[in-house]
């Protein structure tokens, strides 16, 4: 590793593998022996289109995406999708039920990002007659202090689903709050897909759930439970697989509505660049796609493939987060750290905790920087410490953090003894 690089625990944009950055360096000058750099080549050149098709295959193979779903690439990030999912799914609902008086958008709110997504849905719903947001559940009343996002509500009776929603939305991993749905489909803190399927079957409704998931900060870090039952899964690339600027979508083909036909029936017009059908029909080159982030994502996922794909990262990320949570537990016993998230709801990607004692958090961060570790400050809205352990953060780097946490705990205990 180049001497001047530090261990980067930033929440995003975040660390990328050194070998990929070195390879990308070459591609910036000469992409796939074309004699043209990747940032300079036409997005319609046969070399780039082949690279894009291969990126799709890498995602499809590693996540086992079935043929029922298209993989699309666009710009606009998570915020872009907060809007796009609402507009496309309202258009779909309008085409399916032109006479409906009401169109409900079901939001499961377990943290800051799903809360923001629900706020955007409320804004956009105001533009279509009969459209409204239903907050299925909000995690805050179930938290230790009754006001923080520190848990995935595990009791199924706390979820108030509506009957025939235009969409059902959740965020797999809440990057700010460090709360994540379990990756084990049988766990009480897994997203309750089975419950939704059973409820739809009991109503005799078609089994095509309008299920939408934000996977921005967990994409490719582990398999996605019930992937085939999702209508839309989306992710910004800038956590696990590449630079900011690329947004990846996995969309079931019945969720590529003809938005103009829907508008003729009273749905809101959808900007062309946000319509999933536009992206699908043009194979994601309707307008200029983010060529450089696509290139780097392709290199990252080629490397991931050789390592063993999402199964490999699930194991490795599991070891990393277990080590950090273990150190938090030790610190808690000594009164130095405090965990923020309830057991069973902890994120495997963004580990959050507090450092107890006046001025001690600043001391912790300063000590980390001195030891070559950066990006550990918690999100400005919630404070505390956040260690983001995305795919490119190595086990050695995590060990360095854990060793430092233990050293810090030792110092804290000595101070207590002295006092
Ligand atoms: C889970 C999640 N969703 C959405 C967003 C917003 O993404 P963007 O900044 O790409 O719009 C973020 C950003 O960090 C995120 O972590």
Image (cartoon, rainbow, N blue to C red):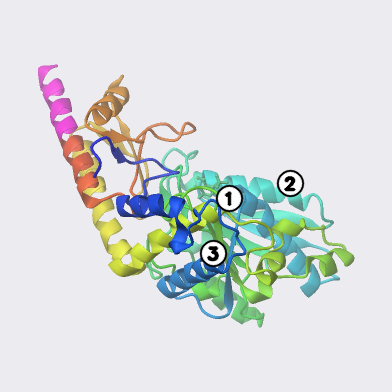
The quadrant in which the C terminus is found is top left
Quadrant of res 229: bottom right
Q: Is mark 1 within 8 Å of ligand 1?
A: yes
Mark seen at residue 77: 1
Quadrant of res 105: bottom right
Residue 209 vs 378, above or below: the answer is: below
Secondary element at image label 2: helix
Give coordinates of residue 64: x percent, y percent: 44, 75
The overriding secondary structure of the stretch rendered in magenta is helix
Give coordinates of residue 156: x percent, y percent: 50, 63
Based on the picture, tell me whether residue 351 belongs to the magenta stretch: no
Based on the picture, tell me whether residue 418 belongs to the magenta stretch: yes
Distance of label 3 from label 2 (alpha carbons): 38 Å
Of pointers 3 and 2, the one earlier in the residue sequence? 3
Eye-nearest disc, 3 or 1: 3
Quickly name the residue at label 3: 48
Quickly name the residue at label 2: 123
Within-10-Å neighbours for mark 2: few <14, some 14–19, many 20+? few
Q: Nearer the viewer, residue 404 or 39?
A: 39
Judge left or right: residue 163 versus residue 333: right
Residue 36 vs 92, above or below: the answer is: above
Q: Please state the extent of the stretch shown in magenta in the rendering.
A: 407-419
Judge left or right: residue 272 versus residue 149: right
Distance of label 2 from label 1 (alpha carbons): 18 Å
């Amino acid at each position: 590793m180049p001497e001047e690089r530090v261990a980067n625990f930033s929440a995003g944009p975040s660390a990328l593998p050194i070998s990929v950055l070195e390879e990308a360096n070459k591609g910036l000058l000469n992409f796939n022996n074309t004699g043209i750099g990747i940032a300079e080549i036409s997005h319609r050149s046969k070399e780039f289109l082949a690279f894009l098709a291969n990126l799709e295959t890498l995602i499809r193979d590693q996540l086992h995406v079935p043929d029922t779903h298209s993989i699309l690439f666009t710009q606009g990030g998570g915020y872009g999708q907060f809007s796009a999912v609402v507009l496309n799914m309202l258009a779909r609902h309008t085409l399916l039920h032109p006479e409906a008086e009401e169109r409900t958008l079901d939001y499961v709110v377990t943290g800051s990002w799903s809360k923001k997504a629900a706020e955007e849905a409320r804004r956009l719903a105001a533009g279509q007659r009969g459209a409204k947001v239903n907050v299925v559940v909000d995690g805050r009343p179930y938290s230790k202090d009754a006001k923080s996002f520190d848990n995935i509500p595990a009791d199924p009776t706390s979820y108030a689903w509506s009957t025939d929603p235009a969409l059902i939305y959740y965020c797999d991993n809440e990057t700010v709050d460090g709360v994540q749905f379990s990756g084990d489909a049988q766990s009480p803190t897994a997203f309750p897909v089975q419950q939704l399927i059973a409820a739809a079957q009991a109503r005799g409704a078609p089994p095509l759930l309008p299920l939408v998931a934000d996977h921005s900060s967990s994409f490719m870090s582990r398999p996605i439970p019930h992937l085939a039952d999702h209508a839309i899964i989306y992710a910004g690339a800038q956590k696990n697989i590449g630079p900011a600027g690329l947004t990846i979508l996995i969309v079931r083909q019945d969720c590529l509505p003809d938005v103009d036909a829907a508008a003729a029936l009273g749905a809101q017009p959808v900007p062309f660049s946000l319509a999933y059908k536009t992206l699908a029909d043009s194979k994601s080159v309707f307008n200029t796609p983010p060529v450089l982030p696509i290139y780097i994502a392709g290199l990252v996922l080629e490397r991931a493939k050789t390592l063993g794909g999402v199964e490999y990262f699930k194991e490795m990320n599991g070891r990393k987060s277990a080590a950090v949570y273990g150190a938090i537990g030790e610190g808690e016993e000594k009164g130095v750290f405090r965990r923020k998230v309830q057991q069973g709801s902890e994120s495997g990607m963004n580990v959050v905790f507090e450092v107890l004692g006046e001025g001690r958090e600043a001391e912790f961060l300063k000590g980390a920087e001195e030891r070559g570790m950066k990006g550990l400050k918690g999100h400005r809205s919630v404070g505390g410490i956040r260690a983001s352990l995305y795919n490119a953060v190595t086990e050695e780097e995590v060990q360095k953090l854990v060793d430092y946490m233990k050293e810090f705990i030792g110092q804290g205990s000595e101070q207590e003894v002295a006092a």
